[in-house]
Amino acid sequence: MAQSFENVSKIPELRNRIFYTLLMFIVFRLGVHITTPGVNAVALTAFFNKANSNLFGMFNMFTGGALSRFSIFSLGIMPYISSSIIFQMLPMVFPAMDRLQKEGEAGRKRLMQYIRYGTVGLALLQSIGISYGIQAMKSPNGIPIVSDPGLPFMIVSVIALTAGTVFVMWIGEEISEHGIGNGISLIIFAGIVSALPAAAVNTFKLVGAGELSPMLIILIIIMMALVIGFIVFVESAQRRIPIQYPKKMVGRKLYSGQVSYLPIKVNTPGVIPPIFAMSILLFPATISNFIKDPFFESVSQYLNPDGFLYNLIFVVLIFFFCYFYTAITFKVDEVADDLRKYGGNVPGIKPGKSTANFIDKILNRVTFIGAVYVSAICLLPTILIDKFHVPFYFGGTGLLIVVVVAMDTIVQIQSHLLYRNYDSLLKKASKKR
């Protein structure tokens, strides 16, 4: 692997893609530090330091620290994720949307445009809620966070937050198209990783103050290493379904049928389920913290990340999105139809509908195991760490996202290297001829 990555510098296209991705990361991190006009940054910092709740910590993690600064990127990529969820579910209700999905590249482009429009609409609604709520907030010393509240601040803040969300969406799409890896996942990845050094420093300060024992930190580091190893193992695991192809007659020779495998990953949807689940849970809970109202305060209490109800809903949503996203990306009927067209069949299973039912049965079992795995990784480390009052950023969800996104990005880099090596071999072979 080390030798492979040494070859990155020798491939201009891949090198440029990696450089472009890093450049977009820098742009994103710069935007995180641009505070929304009209906000007292000192009072805001004091307020968040005092609040120090897991709820703000979780949403702040997904925005890369933008929320705690009330920057123009405070909404992060969440409106885009929410819009994607809505438009991926619409084909179940509206046949026209289902037909749009089947129109190929043209349909995909139109669907992406609808998702962008939905992102702008959701960003407007969410920015109005946050901008309205923050005007009533004060620092622990009684200093207003918004020095001059009112309609002018609301207008400027809503425009800034909405424009910031659109810009983050653009960064994500640019990374996906011109960079390396999935842009949206990498933005969340960058936000989590950027906060890890500060969280580590804070942890060691607690050790120095005697609030945490060094042995406890060592045990947590060991636990994290074991969790990372487990994530890598499960993400690489597959359930292989054997596929038998018929014998071929070439000239006078009869060649035996080829045997291949249909791989089904244990965690087919990757980090999509926990990201989607958190985007649904976190924003209503965060808004309820900004708006001082009895109803919203009760919502905030019920959706406390430390509470049983939050964790229960979180697990249910993870299971739902594991099955939902797998059904979208793995079309069982299409796979069975393709196998039948090319003469492939599962040994002992009739081609066509029987094959589709067989694959679907295995897929459901594997998806269930994957959903249990994702839920366990997201909840168990966080529950254990919360009991020892270790800073939130070392939780399971963040760890899962960082490891899986890093693995997917490495796989994409290796695919580029393999393609380039294969291409060069073909060119050499053609020259010899």
Image: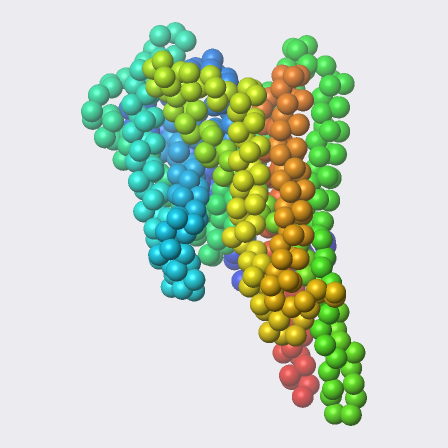
Residue 373: x and y, percent?
67, 38
Residue at 51 percent of width and 52 percent of height: 328
Residue at 79 percent of width and 88 percent of height: 253
Instruction: Note whether residue 191 is visible.
Output: no
Residue 122: x and y, percent?
34, 38
Residue at 58 percent of width and 24 percent of height: 392
Instruction: List the single residue furthest toward the left.
Output: 151
Where on the picture, by quarter, is residue 108?
bottom left
Q: Relative to residue 163, is residue 415 depicted above or below?
A: below
Query: Quick one: quadrant of the N terminus?
Result: bottom right
Q: Is residue 111 left or right of residue 363?
A: left
Query: Quick one: quadrant of the C terminus?
Result: bottom right
Q: Is residue 43 left or right of residue 373?
A: left
Q: Is residue 91 left or right of residue 248?
A: left
Residue at 35 percent of width and 48 percent of height: 116
Residue 123 versus residue 177: which sits nearer the camera?
123
Residue 204 versus residue 276: which sits nearer the camera?
276
Residue 169 versus residue 45: which sits nearer the camera?
169
Query: How many discs appear?
Result: 0
Residue 162: x and y, percent?
32, 37
Instruction: Note whether residue 204 is visible.
Output: yes
